[in-house]
Amino acid sequence: MEGKAIKYGDNVDTDVIIPARFLNTSDPKELASHCMEDIDKDFKNKVKPGDIMIAGYNFGCGSSREHAPIAIKESGISCVIAKSFARIFYRNAINIGLPILECPDAASAIEDGDMVSVDLETGIIRDITKGIEFKSQPFPEFIKKIIECGGLINYVKEKVV
Amino acid sequence: MGLTLTQKILADKAGYDVRPGDLIEIDVDMVLGNDVTSPVAIKEFSKIGSKKVFDKEKIALVPDHFVPNKDIKSAEQVNIVRKFAKEYGIVNFFEVGKMGIEHALLPEKGLVLPGDVVIGADSHTCTYGAITCFSTGIGSTDMACAMATGKAWFKVPEAIRFNLKGKLNKWVSGKDVILYIIGMIGVDGALYKSMEFTGDISSLSIDDRFTIANMAIEAGAKNGIFDYDEITEAYVKRRANRKYKVFKADEDADYVESYDIDLSKIKPQVAFPHLPENTKAIDEVGNIKIDQVVIGSCTNGRISDMEVTYEVLKGKKVHPDVRLIIFPATQDIYLECVKRGYIEEFIKAGAAVSTPTCGPCLGGHMGILAKGEKAISTTNRNFVGRMGHTESEVYLASPAVAAASAIKGCIASPEEVV
């Protein structure tokens, strides 16, 4: 995957990713139309399909609302790269099939607007604009299995039905 | 090396010796959802194609965020939950009139007990660690899968130990302890880890412990958990109608960090906008005028919170420039407030008293802030826009400080008014 970097700071919470006043719906399109609204009013106009979100420490902290990764995914973001993720956001993203990578070096170096490519197989992140490469932490086997199934629902489906 | 309290509970469920970092899939004793997270979970559940839930008694559905419903859309969300509960015979569905804020309600009804593994599609599910169970917040997809299979996946966490000693001073409560700790370790200070509270916990009431465990998530923790003692037993015994198991950390348990906390040294705390880690002791706060005070929530809506609010407010008047909103967390707590005469005093003081709801805490309804307004609140988050306009501000504090502030019109210590 390849896209333009849209960069935010530390402790981006799920209240700013999707404010609670929009949680009276679970429609992904409606949620995406308000994604990042309280931290970046311009987000919905500038985001293009495939763009990559870059963030600092503790991305997705706060509320467990799955509406947050749903809104990010639906808005066209192909991958989130952060210095670290809050744990509920981390599992929600994996469970719904939104690719996320923890890589402090990449998250520091990549600047807003840089072209970035990501290879999920190898965990290699490239800042094409700057011509530098990073290697993110590979996922544990169990989590790879969930991702390979296309999310937790498919993983569980095989067992239940 | 031995195991921490959390690791012991997880090892028992897994049925084998677990180590931090292990990924395990284990049975859960309770799966919780609310009116925001359950509709998403129900949609995902339908994709699994399961015709029944794993156990009708081990699922709790508690519409509490936008109830009594604030608009048509939220009414429709609750209807999805209500219909699902009927169709699948969910025993623990709590309708308006019988409901409470989920994290006050579940322990009160004896639905979560020591030694349990509890997951909830709400980040403050970590509250129940107060009664020595493993409980943690998860998302809607996790909830959907657990409703079908009765299982969830976890990474066995490392733990930070908080070794408590000393007694809390007058007007200092569990809220001040947890704000103090978050101020010390930061909002990601316990990321992916357990916060285990041990040592001399005898001066912490069960309500103090619920408040402390509730905000473990605000330090990024997976769970917060207290040792089991007579106070736990007194609370749990009369509510439990099934057997439960009491666990203890091994003597040689391995903690990644350990802090000694002297409770007698902690002063009332206030967390400044826009992170719970921005804490100051009350005597360093300065003059901050406020427009609104909120007392309640899953953090501080329990009977001892109402009791201290009453102590501060009785015979006094809310400042003319301030709106005070009090919301007891469950119907039982509300009724107890009525019986004890608290509600009459609250109303005489000039407060608005509400039926249980999460409403104002998350900027849902029942007390939204306008541009430029400031609130002091006993809730758990003060993020940008959390209670309303992105240019409003939320200060977090205990019920004692919040009630005193309502009288003074600015952030104040209870000592200034009582």
Image (cartoon, coloured by chain):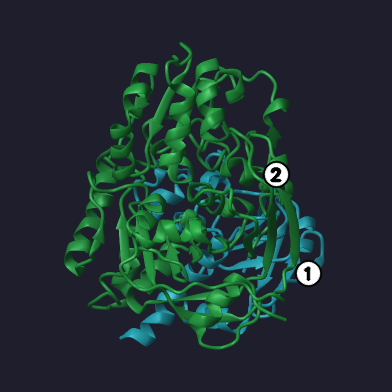
Chain colours: A cyan, B green
**Residue B407 location (% of width, % of height):** 50, 17
**Residue B113 location (% of width, % of height):** 41, 66
| Residue, disc 2 | B183
Q: Amino acid at mark 1?
A: Phe
Q: Chain for mark 2? A: B
Of residues A23 and B61, which is closer to you in this image? B61
| Above or below for A37 versus B81 | above
Tag 1, which secondary structure?
A: strand
Q: Quadrant of the C terminus of chain A?
A: bottom left
Which residue extends farthest top? B320
Number of numbered discs visible in the structure rendering:
2
| Above or below for B131 versus B343 | below
| Residue, disc 1 | A134
Q: CA distance from mark 1 to mark 2?
A: 33 Å
Of residues B414 and B78, which is closer to you in this image? B414
Q: Is residue B280 left or right of residue B243?
A: right
Bin the neighbour count of mark 2 within 10 Å (Cα to Cα): few under 14, some 14-19, many 20 and up: many
Q: Residue placed at 25% from the left, 58% from the top?
A: B93
Q: Chain for mark 1? A: A
